Amino acid sequence: MGLMASTASLTRYRVNGKLGENPIEQVELALKRYRIVEIDNEPLEAATGWTNLNDPFHPDFDGSSFLVASYFVFSLRIDKKSVPANVFKKHVALEEKKRLRESGREFLSKTEKKELRDDVKQILLSRMPPVPHVYDVVWDFENNLLWFYSTQKAANEELETLFLKSFNINLVKLFPYTIADLAMDLPDQDKDILYKLKPTRFME
Amino acid sequence: MLDIAVAYNQYKFLGHEFLTWLWYAIDTSQDDLFKDETGVPYIFIIGNRIVCENIVEDNTVESVTIKGDNAGLEEGLTALKKGSIVTEMSLSLMYLDQTWEFNLKGENLHFTGLKHPATEKVQKKEDMEGALLEKIYLYGKAVEIVDSAFKSFIRLRLSNTWKSVTADIRKWIESADQNP
């Protein structure tokens, strides 16, 4: 449900800072530095990084491919692996039996059991293909606004963290209070009224 | 400025009041409120889903959801009469002969299920940039218009007029039985 889909979900942000003198170059460098890294054969549970909107499985930002008129358009990709509990349990049991047979012992210590579980998890994670999730980003550079094509809390938190790390700029989520406070150019006296507002009771 | 998480929770009611006001404004044809920055009018139509919530004395939340293509909205008005406010709403937006559909959640004004007017399918790679710009424009228009309506609400909410608007909304809710 991204930018090119027929239906979308949208969270809006205010970009709370400015890029340097060469914004396109700066964005290109940051996107390249923090692009998604494949974890297919790695013992890792998750990876987060930037990718291309049109070709999310071949991240390549050469030639300012992310620049569309005055917008920076790219995607956040979150790859996740999860080992099903029953698969993990089975492999722990098999490995435990193997280690006992090899050592000729009847029991493993608590520490050995923990090491065994860690080893099994690493092995299974290396074999498991990650599930990719792609969320589009439209950054209206001139107006310091950003749209993120997801309303999922976890995906939004990943965006906020990676954006700050990549561009050294904070994102401020736009919701009723922040729209009124930051996006309306209210005079100070109206802002004072806004800060003191209490809920209205429409019916007594 | 307040901490974002604190502000989000403390002022959640603003979005709920906005949706409640929006329903009133749509139902009582307050057409003069619904114009974009260049004066072009737009129309909101209530969609097939409204969620109303009431926080009762022991801080528990009573929730009423009205959904379905032929759902009557009287139950929603009855809920408002009992002190509820609107927390979610689906809307159609008509602007210059084009239609958008979406759901709005009051507490964050996030758009879900946002459908914009139909666009041409992209046939060639070189048409991609134009298609992206068209999509950005269409999504942006819905955002801009909802923001415009929200800003109209905020201006009223912060003004001395809000008391009389509240009284009008109360009359509208009370008249629900007479105008089903």
Image (cartoon, coloured by chain):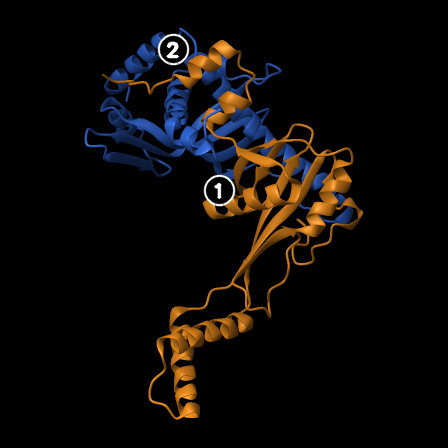
Left or right: B148 as drawn, with respect to B63: right
Q: In this view, does B42 lie above or below A71?
A: above
Q: Is residue A104 above or below residue B154?
A: below
Given residues B7 and A2, the one toward you in this image is B7
Q: In which quarter of the image is residue A132?
A: bottom right
User: In the rendered image of this protein, which colour is used for chain A?
Assistant: orange
Which residue, given by chain and number where applicable, does mark 1 sit on?
Answer: A151
User: Which tint was used for chain B?
Assistant: blue
Residue at 62% in and 52% down: A49
Q: Give the percent coordinates (x, y) of residue A77.
A: 59, 53
Seen in the picture, residue B33 relative to B90 is either above or below; the reply is above
The amino acid type found where label 1 is placed reads Thr
Instruction: Report the number of discs.
Output: 2
Label 1, label 2: how far apart the Cα atoms are = 31 Å
The image's mark for residue B162 is: 2
Left-right relation of A59 to A81: right
In the image: residue B23, left or right of residue A135:
left
Q: What element carries label 2?
A: helix
- Element type where label 1 sits in the image: loop
Residue drawn at 47 percent across, 71 percent down = A121
Q: Where is residue A120 in the image (x, y as percent from the top left)?
A: 46, 75
